[in-house]
Amino acid sequence: MEEESEVGRESDLKAAGAELLPDGRRGLHLKGWKIEIPPSIHSHLSRHPRLKKIWAGVPFDFRPNGSHALNSHSNTKNPFGLVTPKYFATWWEEKLGTSHLPEMVFGESSLCLSHVDSGVKLHYNAFDALKGWKQEALPPVEVPAAAKWKFRSKPFQQVILDYDYTFTTPYCGSEAIEPNQGKITSENSCFDLQWEDCDERIDLAALSAKEPILFYDEVILYEDELADNGVSLLTAKVRVMPSCWFLLLRFWLRVDGVLMRLRDTRVYCAFNDKAKPVILRESCWREATIQSLSSKGFPTDAAVYGDPSHISQKLPIIKHKTQRLNIPG
């Protein structure tokens, strides 16, 4: 990876015709796309000193199981129309139809890629990812340490692990069409976004070619340390070059001594001034038990598997699919 000082150099941005977003926002405009890590409520408050003082220390990213700040503010609305976090986790639980959430949910973190003329917007967020987890509803992984976890969310009650506490999600992103100041035609406004299965593949070798990186960022959507018995982590990364943008949405699960699961979604769009944009999305699910890896001579020590990139090729593929999305002109 390029050094941070070499990402987004002014000379490279100018040569590519890219413009950074104003007001300190994280992202850029390039070739008809706006790529952004949307600002949090805290960034809005920073421009309002009085409100910043009132809301100091209020977390919109939250730990459902025991963050005192969730219960320390009244349920009122501020001038932005946002509810204070007293019942923030409860709201998520009600909307998702569950009493279980990951230890750390970064509810304000998201990543958006918008095609300005068509109004097509791809976005990646924790709430939709957890909807996918709830809908898939995998059976709980049987582990020796399960007895430790049954008291995690309700210390004074025995909790039966009858849900997927790994928060594995099939989520591969969200999409919408947002009309943009009359630029979108009436025909396109009725266009239904449909991902079509295809045989094309994202050329990962081409992505490793030497090319200036105009913008790079990563967001964590949620994380759970499984009571110190592993990790469940969902992240989204985006990289923008003069010729294309590339996104990796990764769900990584390691249940120590039991299982490893990796679900990667790669999304790619090449810039082409003469043709309508085409987006490729490639989903690859890998999974293996620690026992099966051990039988092949791989170590069983959890410390070896801290970085999923080091183990990914050793995990067998259980599902692979490539799709394309044609953006209306």
Image: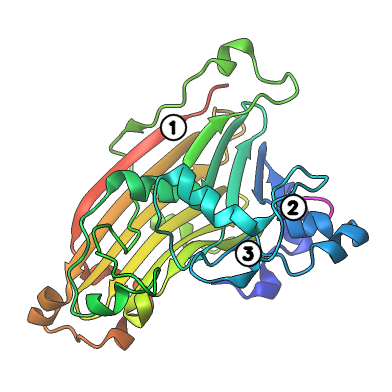
Q: Is residue 52 left or right of residue 191?
A: right
Q: Hey, what amino acid is under mark 1?
A: Leu
Camera-nearest label, 1 or 2: 1
Residue at image mark 1: 325
How was this image coloured?
Answer: rainbow
Point out which mark residue 27 bears.
none
In the image, the segment drawn in magenta is 20-24
Judged from the image, the secondary structure of the residue bearing numbered disc 3 is: helix
Residue 204 image position (x, y, % from top left)? 40, 56
Q: Hey, what amino acid is under mark 3?
A: Asn
Q: What residue sits 48% from the left and 43% below the top? A: 95
Gap in angstroms between the C-alphas marked 2 and 3:
50 Å
Residue at image mark 2: 15
Q: Hey, what amino acid is under mark 2?
A: Ala
The answer to whether residue 83 is above or below residue 227 is above
How dense is the environment of label 2, judged by Cα within 10 Å: few (below 14), some, or many (20 and up)? Answer: few
Q: Is residue 288 left or right of residue 237?
A: left
Residue at image mark 3: 71
